[in-house]
C-alpha cells in the first residue's frame, strides 16, 4: 500500500511536552500573559525506574482540543546541552496558529506588555509570524495565514521532499543540487503533457 493510499486518521496534536525548570515563569507566561487556560495536571510520585523523580505534569489548552504540556521534576537541577549549536536549539520550536492579523497583533500586544516581548515579526511565504523565547529558553512562534494552501502547494511540497531525500542520500548535499534534482523530478512528472501556459 502506498503512502497516498493509507487512511489518514490522526486528528491533530493531543499534546506536545517539554521539561521546565521554572514552573512559576512558565505558568505566568502561558496562562497569565498569553491567556492559555490550565486544563489538566498529573501530580505523581516517580514511576518506572527506581530513580525516577517525583513530578508535576501540567497542561495548557492551545485551542482546537490541542494542549501544550510541561514536566517539572522535583530535585532535578536545571540542564541544557550546550553542545547543541544555537541554530539547532532554536530550530526546535513550537508554532501555534491564529486566524487573523487582528489576533496576531493581540498576542504581540500581550507579549510586548510583559517580561517576554516579541523578538521578531516576519512574513514568510504563506504565513506571518511573531517569535518569542519563553521562560525556559524555548522559541515559540504564533502565526497567521497570508493565503490559503492550495493543491499546487501540496504538489510542490511532495516534489520538494522527494528531491531532498535524493540529494541528502548523496555526498555533500547542497541547495543547488536540491534545486537541480527538483527540476528533474518536475520535468519527469510532467513529460508529455500539453503546454498549459499561454502568453498574451
Image (spheres, rainbow, N blue to C red):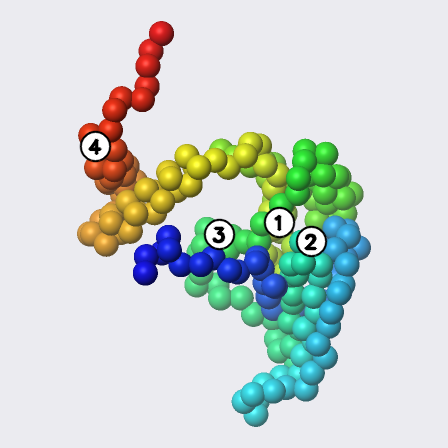
Disc 4 is placed on an element classified as loop
Task: Choose between 113 and 127: the one closer to the eye.
Answer: 127
Badge 2 crowding class, 10 Å Cα cut-off, few under 14, some 14 to 19, many 20 or more, is few
Badge 3 crowding class, 10 Å Cα cut-off, few under 14, some 14 to 19, many 20 or more, is few
Which badge, 4 or 2, is on the more N-terminal residue? 2
Task: Choose between 93 and 4: the one closer to the eye.
Answer: 4
Badge 1 crowding class, 10 Å Cα cut-off, few under 14, some 14 to 19, many 20 or more, is few
Q: Is label 1 or label 2 in front?
A: 2
Tell me if label 3 and label 2 are in contact, CB under 8 Å: no
Q: CA distance from mark 1 to mark 3?
A: 15 Å
Mark linked to residue 91: 3
Which badge, 1 or 4, is on the more N-terminal residue? 1
Badge 4 crowding class, 10 Å Cα cut-off, few under 14, some 14 to 19, many 20 or more, is few
Q: Residue at x 63, y 86 (%)?
A: 46
Q: Is label 4 or label 2 in front?
A: 4
Residue 73 rendering spot, x and y as whole percentages: 65, 77
Q: CA distance from mark 1 to mark 4?
A: 39 Å
Q: Residue at x 55, y 32 (%)?
A: 147
Look at mark 2 in the image and give the residue it sits on: 63
Q: Residue at x 43, y 63 (%)?
A: 83
The C terminus: image quadrant? top left
Q: CA distance from mark 3 to mark 2?
A: 23 Å
Mark linked to residue 96: 1
Amino acid at each position: 500500500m502506498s503512502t497516498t493510499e493509507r487512511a489518514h486518521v490522526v486528528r491533530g496534536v493531543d499534546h506536545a511536552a517539554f521539561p521546565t525548570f521554572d514552573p512559576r515563569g512558565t505558568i505566568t507566561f502561558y496562562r497569565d500573559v498569553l491567556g492559555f487556560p490550565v486544563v489538566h495536571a498529573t501530580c505523581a510520585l516517580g514511576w518506572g525506574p527506581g530513580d525516577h523523580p517525583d513530578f508535576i505534569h501540567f497542561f495548557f489548552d492551545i485551542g482546537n482540543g490541542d494542549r501544550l504540556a510541561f514536566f517539572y521534576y522535583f530535585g532535578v537541577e536545571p540542564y541544557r546541552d550546550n553542545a547543541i549549536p544555537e541554530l539547532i536549539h532554536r530550530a526546535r520550536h513550537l508554532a501555534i496558529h491564529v486566524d487573523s492579523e487582528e489576533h496576531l497583533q493581540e498576542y504581540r500586544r500581550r507579549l510586548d506588555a510583559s517580561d517576554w516581548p516579541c523578538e521578531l515579526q516576519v512574513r514568510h511565504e504563506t504565513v506571518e509570524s511573531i517569535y518569542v523565547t519563553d521562560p525556559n529558553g524555548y522559541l515559540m512562534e504564533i502565526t497567521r495565514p497570508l493565503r490559503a494552501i492550495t493543491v499546487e502547494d501540496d504538489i510542490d511540497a511532495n516534489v520538494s521532499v522527494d528531491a531532498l531525500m535524493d540529494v541528502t542520500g548523496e555526498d555533500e548535499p547542497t541547495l543547488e543540487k536540491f534545486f537541480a534534482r527538483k527540476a528533474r523530478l518536475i520535468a519527469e512528472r510532467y513529460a508529455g503533457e500539453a503546454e498549459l501556459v499561454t502568453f498574451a
